[in-house]
Amino acid sequence: MKYTLDIIINKPIDEVIALFDNPDNLKKWQPELVSFEHISGEVGQPGAQSKLVYLMGKRKCEMVETIETRNLPDEFTGTYETQGVFNRVENRFKPVGSDQTHWTTHTEFQFTSLGMKLMGFFMKKAFPKQTMQFMQQFKNFAEKE
């Protein structure tokens, strides 16, 4: 499953990138995030891995983030792997005038277990909806900072 979403953030691109690129800010716009732990590699650089733990309802979800590309503001791409799911997210940022930023995500999900393949099939609309929710939460956070 692949999809592309975008949003306009009412903040200059340099401020947006500074907020996006700081892992200490993750919990400020991802309230479901329980913990973020660096595992290996140079922090924030391609090849670096981190463990993220989310609370989704009553269920904990652990995933490993691997940074593929860090060429901000043009691109930040990472993969996110958890049991039965491989997710690749490419983030791109472009200035819109001097006081707005256009954020685009290209997202791909690959389901590796039968259970997740079925869930992906029956809940196709839930995945883009969740991504847009995270984008909106970041926009709200960034515009308040």
Image: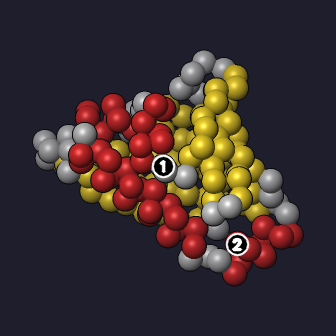
- Residue 114: mark in rendering: none
**Of residues 134 and 89, the one drawn nearer to the viewer in this rendering:** 134
- The answer to whether residue 102 is seen in the rendering is no
Please report whichever mark, 2 or 1, sits nearer to the chain's N-terminal start.
Answer: 1
Apparent side of residue 70 relative to residue 54 in the rendered image (left or right): left
Residue on which the image places disc 1: 30
Apparent side of residue 44 relative to residue 123 in the rendered image (left or right): left
Badge 2 amino acid = Gly
Toward the right, the furthest residue is: 114
Apparent side of residue 77 relative to residue 64 in the rendered image (left or right): left
Toward the left, the furthest residue is: 98
| Helix, strand or loop status at disc 1 | loop
Q: Residue at x 25, y 40 (%)?
A: 145
The answer to whether residue 54 is above or below residue 120 is above
Pinpoint residue 127: horizontal percent, then vertical percent. Answer: 58, 68
Q: Residues within 10 Å of mark 2 (few under 14, many from 20)?
A: some
Mark 2 to mark 1: distance in Å? Answer: 22 Å
**Of residues 50 and 53, the one drawn nearer to the viewer in this rendering:** 53
Pinpoint residue 11: horizontal percent, then vertical percent. Answer: 21, 44
Q: Residues within 10 Å of mark 1 (few under 14, many from 20)?
A: some
- Residue 120: mark in rendering: 2
Q: Residue at x 49, y 50 (%)?
A: 31
